[in-house]
Amino acid sequence: MTEEIVNPFPSPPSHYRLYTQHNLNLLDLLRTRTSTNDHDPISPEKQQQTLSDQDQVPPWDLTTLEKPRADWIIEQGGYETFGDFWPVRAARSNICRQLHSLVLIFPRYLNATQHLRKGGFSSCISKATVCDALFWYSHILMNN
């Protein structure tokens, strides 16, 4: 009896194959020729017309290759990747509020402001780092 080995990790979505250097160069050329900014819509007709002198222009919208807008992610409270929604604001801020009840992560005898001005805290962890670590730790615990 033959058993098939199954990959424990999900396959990436098929659209990752669209991020070729050729397609990214076409996107840069399209933005340059149309004098548009990132995330400005360009109709498929205008895309085909603008890049008519180029080889292998895809029929789909090249602007889908642009990086996501951070301001939209903050407005929506998270982002979606590979079908999963990842929150960025609400859960993190709750953990940050809880962080204030934790014991100080640097000795009390240090004057924090003076030490920061000198570029110190090399052996100390910032509250933001602890906040991020607690957020991801709690996210792992909630999803398992």
Image: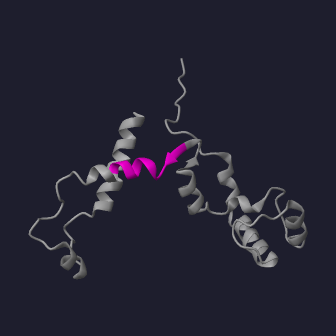
Q: Look at the image and tell me in which quarter the C terminus lies.
A: top left
- The question of residue 59 being in magenta is answered with no
Q: Residue at x 25, y 54 (%)?
A: 100
Q: Residue at x 46, y 53 (%)?
A: 89
- Place residue 30 in its image quadrant: bottom right
Residue 80, above or below 38 = above
Left or right: 27 as drawn, with respect to 81: right
- The question of residue 91 being in magenta is answered with yes
Q: Residue at x 16, y 64 (%)?
A: 106
Q: Position of residue 74 (x, y in %)?
A: 53, 57
Left or right: 67 as drawn, with respect to 115: right
Left or right: 93 as drawn, with respect to 12: left
> Which residue is most to the bottom?
118
Q: Position of residue 92 (x, y in %)?
A: 40, 51
Question: Which of 38 and 32 lies nearest the eye of the viewer?
Answer: 38
- Place residue 62 in its image quadrant: bottom right
Looking at the rendering, the stretch of residues picked out in magenta corresponds to 85-95
Q: Position of residue 81 (x, y in %)?
A: 57, 48
Q: How many marks?
A: 0
Q: Position of residue 59 (x, y in %)?
A: 84, 57
